[in-house]
Amino acid sequence: MVFIDFEFDRGIINLLRLYSKTKYIYNDKRWFIKKELFNYYEIISILGEKYDINSDNLQMFYSVPKKYEDILKRKRYSENTIKTYCNYFENFIYYFSEKELPEITIGEINDYILELINSKNISISQQNQRINAIKFYYEKVLGRKKEYYLIERPRAEKKLPNVLSKEEITRLINAISNKKHKCIISIIYSAGLRRSEVLNIKPEDIDSNRMLIKIAGGKGKKDRYSLLSARLLDNLRIYYKEYKPKKWLFEGQNKGKYSAESVGSILKTALLKSGIKKKVTPHTLRHSFATHLLEQGTDLRYIQELLGHSNSKTTEIYTHVSNRELGKIKSPLDSD
């Protein structure tokens, strides 16, 4: 469906009532048109003369070529990457809806990216993802040479990750009463996992004899092991007896894989209950795991292995966050 959202206006309501394709949902109090009946230019002709129409969300109706998604799957890109690439490439198709994709020039692509930076203030990370999504089409789908798509890349921002203290982690976990939810947040922190890695854990990946967790097919399709907390293991045993998961360690109501959105929701609720005001995402827990290990004196090489970083430079960022050395320095304000 295509929803038509607006602040209450009797004039718009009267126009929509006269238009045979629009319907009203009384429960949601929203007007809509069935997708197959939607005609943007008809809406413009009905409402456009008197009202400004914001059509930013209409890019959802411009689908990526089937071959684009097929090749992404064939190359074994992760579900998240496929979703991100398809979403960004749909945006690109919508922007150039009046042109044939093979005819779009490098100059036009650069102008498109620049406009996103200026109008939407997209991050450097998102900018690179959008460029990669576009390049994938021209290089992998159309088979053009890489050097034809040399798009200028920005310098990476040197931002330090947000980290919670051990006390804040304890407050956060203690604020969760649901056994499954407590285990999910605990395992992300205690093993330094990515959200997608938590969702892919199976019961047999918990090795209680060696006190390790197997992470199968992590980022870069690499398997690795991380730590299994003794405290977490106790909670997992209680959780397992009550919930009896089948295929995945954490399953939704229909016994399917637990959703990434649900993990975000759990964390958001726990933050509200714990009173923690910092900006925290599931990845913050992974950053906190690495930082706390470093502060405990764990060698950086082992932290790299536990996190599954292919490059040691990525792990070294935690040396700038840890208070292991800085904590020994006394502020001049506190000196005699």
Image: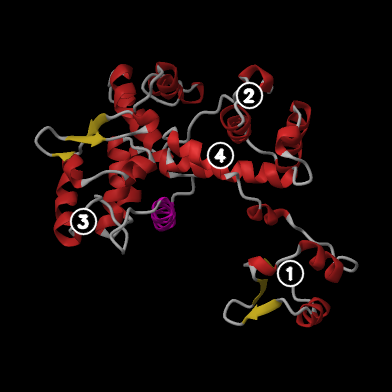
Q: Is residue 12 visible?
A: yes
Closer to us: mark 2 or mark 1?
2
Which amino acid type corresponds to the residue marked 3 in the rendered image? Pro
Tell which circle, 1 or 4, labels the residue nearer the N-terminal end: 1
What is the distance, in whole Å, between disc 2 and disc 1 at their CAs? 44 Å
Q: Residue at x 16, y 45 (%)?
A: 233
Amino acid type of the residue that numbered disc 1 sits on in the rendered structure: Phe
Q: In the image, is residue 263 part of the stretch drawn in magenta?
A: yes
Q: Is residue 141 above or below residue 167?
A: above
Mark carried by residue 245: 3
- The residue carrying mark 2 is 144
SS at badge 2: loop
Q: Secondary structure at mark 1?
A: loop
Earlier in the chain: of badge 3 and badge 2, it is: 2
Is there CB contact under 8 Å for labels 2 and 1? no
Q: Is residue 171 magenta?
A: no
Image quadrant where one finds the C terminus: top left
Asked whether the viewer can see residue 77, the reply is: no
Q: Which mark identifies residue 6?
A: 1
Q: Quickly name the residue at label 4.
A: 68
Q: Secondary structure at mark 4?
A: helix
> Whole-Å distance between the Cαs marked 1 and 4?
35 Å
Mark number displayed over residue 32 = none
Quarter residue 262 falls in? bottom left
Q: Which segment is the magenta one?
A: 260-275
Mark 4 or mark 3: whose residue is earlier in sequence = 4
